[in-house]
């Protein structure tokens, strides 16, 4: 589906009914990232998945920032007349979920932080964002995809399911350069979110692929450590998965999500 909001165009999927669960993709991905979980969970909950500003079929000019992505998501939910929702974000999607808590905590029923981290970019990471901005402008999205591919997929998946590499590369290579460049600036400038995590009071699940080298289990553990008791947080490590765990071990990630969603019944909003 396509909707025009504040002069920008957003693509999204919306299936199922009941508790709204919003799936936020990472960088440089689109809403297809979470397709398997959405299909599996739509008989039980309402699954909403936007293409974030500048990705997939969403066409949006700047500015690009985690705050802007968060505001875009809330504007889409307003448009759909959806109140508090669970936000399930992978990597950059998790950074956006943390911005959502800073800006719109009343809209949050729960969080799933998947293969993400709370820390800001290091100096080296910021320099690498600049390098990738140059690559995107000079060589296009395919060259960005080539540079990022190795870190995306875990070592066990690469040997167990070699064809996934081409699928993930294709998803990354089809993203618009403007969206990639905008997101790289937003990633570079995002704040540290450890203090944000400390203030979370809704049920929170932290998921991470065992073989994730971009946001490894140690980052997930540091998120878990920062979350207060009020978040009733727990962490699941997805065996044999890397950074895009929801594509690498889809059934295992769906299972973890389904279990978490069941526990929400014991935490009335
Ligand atoms: C992502 O998957 O969203 C990116 O790896 C996030 C990042 O580069 O920090």
Image: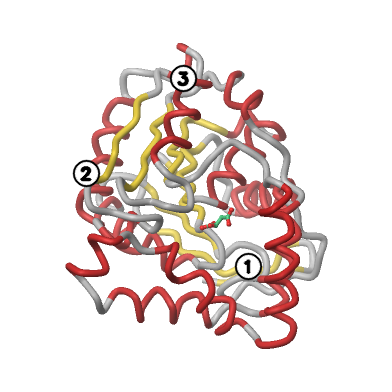
229, 79: nearer the viewer = 229
Q: Give me the residue at 36% from left, 48% from top.
A: 17
Q: Which structural element holds mark 2?
A: helix
Among numbered discs 1 and 2, the one appearing first in the sequence: 1
Question: What separation in Å lies between label 1 and label 2 (alpha carbons)?
Answer: 29 Å
91, 202: nearer the viewer = 91
Residue assigned mark 1: 10
Q: Which mark is residue 255?
A: 2
Q: Which structural element holds mark 1?
A: strand
Q: Name the spot of residue 215 as percent of width and height, x first.
A: 47, 47
CB under 8 Å between discs 1 and 2: no
Among numbered discs 1 and 3, the one appearing first in the sequence: 1
Figure quadrant of residue 203: top left
Among numbered discs 3 and 2, the one appearing first in the sequence: 3
Q: Give me the residue at 31% from left, 34% from top.
A: 261
Figure quadrant of residue 88: top left
Residue assigned mark 3: 231
Q: Is residue 137 left or right of residue 175?
A: right
| Residue sitting farthest toward the right | 63
Q: Name the spot of residue 23 as percent of width and height, x first.
A: 46, 52
Q: Where does ligand 1 appear, by image quarter?
A: bottom right
Q: Name the spot of residue 21 as percent of width and height, x first.
A: 43, 45
127, 208: nearer the viewer = 127
| Residue sitting farthest toward the top | 229
Question: What separation in Å lies between label 1 and label 3 (alpha carbons)?
Answer: 31 Å
Q: How would you rate the neighbour count of disc 2 (Cα within 10 Å): few for under 14, some for 14-19, many for 20 or more? A: some
Figure quadrant of residue 238: top left
Q: Is residue 250 left or right of residue 244?
A: left
The vertical placement of 65 against 193, above or below, is below
Q: Name the spot of residue 103 as percent of width and height, x first.
A: 72, 34
């Amino acid at each position: 589906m396509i909707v025009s909001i504040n002069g920008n165009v957003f693509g999204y999927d919306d299936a199922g009914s009941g508790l709204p669960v919003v799936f936020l993709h990472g960088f440089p991905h689109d809403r297809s990232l979470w397709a398997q979980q959405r299909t599996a969970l739509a008989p039980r909950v309402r699954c909403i998945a936007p293409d974030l500003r500048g990705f997939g079929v969403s066409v949006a000019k700047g500015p690009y920032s985690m705050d802007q992505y968060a505001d875009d998501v809330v504007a889409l939910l307003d448009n759909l007349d959806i109140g508090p929702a669970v936000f399930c974000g992978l990597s950059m999607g998790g950074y956006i979920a943390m911005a959502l808590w800073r800006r719109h905590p009343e809209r949050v029923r729960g969080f799933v932080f998947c293969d993400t981290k709370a820390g800001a970019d290091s100096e080296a990471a910021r320099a690498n964002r600049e390098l990738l901005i140059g690559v995107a402008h000079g060589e296009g999205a395919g060259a960005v995809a080539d540079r990022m591919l190795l870190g995306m997929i875990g070592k066990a998946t690469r040997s167990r399911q070699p064809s996934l590499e081409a699928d993930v590369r294709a998803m990354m290579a089809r993203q618009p350069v403007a969206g990639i460049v905008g997101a790289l600036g937003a990633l570079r400038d995002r704040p540290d979110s450890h203090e944000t995590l400390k203030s979370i009071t809704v049920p929170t699940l932290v998921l991470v692929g065992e073989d994730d080298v971009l946001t490894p289990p140690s980052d997930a553990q540091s998120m878990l450590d920062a979350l207060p008791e009020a978040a009733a947080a727990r962490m699941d490590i997805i065996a044999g998965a890397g950074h895009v765990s929801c594509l690498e071990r889809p059934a295992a990630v769906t299972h973890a999500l389904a279990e978490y969603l069941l526990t929400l019944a014991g935490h009335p909003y």
